[in-house]
Image (cartoon, grey):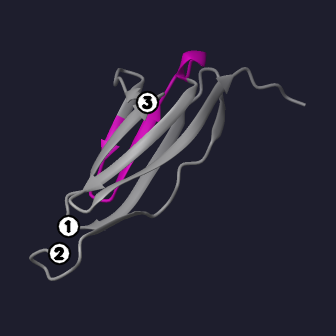
Amino acid sequence: MDDSTGKRPYLRLTSTLPNVTRALGGEVRLKCEAAGAPLPISFTWLKNNAPLEKNRRTKVRNKEYFSKLIISDLDVLDSGYYLCSASNSAGTVNTTAVLRVGFLTLI
């Protein structure tokens, strides 16, 4: 079914989340990007299949076509599976990253 613009509704990821390893106390930025019509595209973040708890160290910045998750002062407990879900009237698409936080050893 076409929307009022005459375009067929669609939604797709324009990038996938990478798996990342970070040092204790560091920072990670994960960017979830999607393209679609009609707007708006809504973004949701989950950690280990549960809603992400935002706090002073965890921030989410949503824009029209992307969402950015920023976690600062990383702790081992921040390790896990992070899923970004993008949705509009055409459906939902997901991408997942594994975050590992720990002591990094220099070789």
Residue 63 or 15: which is nearer the viewer?
A: 15
Give the x, y percent position of residue 55. 35, 21
Frontmost of labels 1 and 3 is: 3
Instruction: Report the amino acid beneath label 1.
Output: Pro
> Left or right: 104 with respect to 58?
right
Residue sitting farthest toward the bottom? 6
**Disc 3 residue type?**
Asn
Residue nearer the viewer, 71 or 34: 34
Vertical arrangement, residue 28 with respect to residue 87, above or below: above
- CA–CA distance in space, label 3 to label 2: 32 Å
Q: Mark 1 points at which residue?
A: 38
**Image mark for residue 49:** 3
Secondary structure state at the residue bearing disc 2? loop
Mark in front: 3 vs 2 = 2
Residue 69: x and y, percent? 42, 39
Residue 19 x %, y % = 62, 42
Q: Do the residues labelled 1 and 3 touch (CB within 8 Å)?
A: no
Q: Are marks 2 and 1 in contact (CB under 8 Å)?
A: no
Foreground residue among 67 and 24: 67
Residues under labels 2 and 1: Cα distance?
12 Å
Location of the N terminus (image quadrant): bottom left
Q: Quadrant of residue 46?
A: top left
Outermost residue toward the front in this view: 1
Compared with 16, 37 (above or below) is: below
Question: Which segment is the magenta one?
Answer: 60-78
Q: Is 40 colored magenta in this rendering? A: no
Query: Against 50, is 89 above or below?
Result: below
Q: Earlier in the sequence, mark 1 or mark 3?
A: 1
Residue 1 image label: 2
Alpha carbon separation for disc pair 1 and 3: 27 Å
Q: Which residue is drawn at 44% across and 36% down?
A: 70
Q: Is mark 3 on a helix, strand or loop?
A: loop
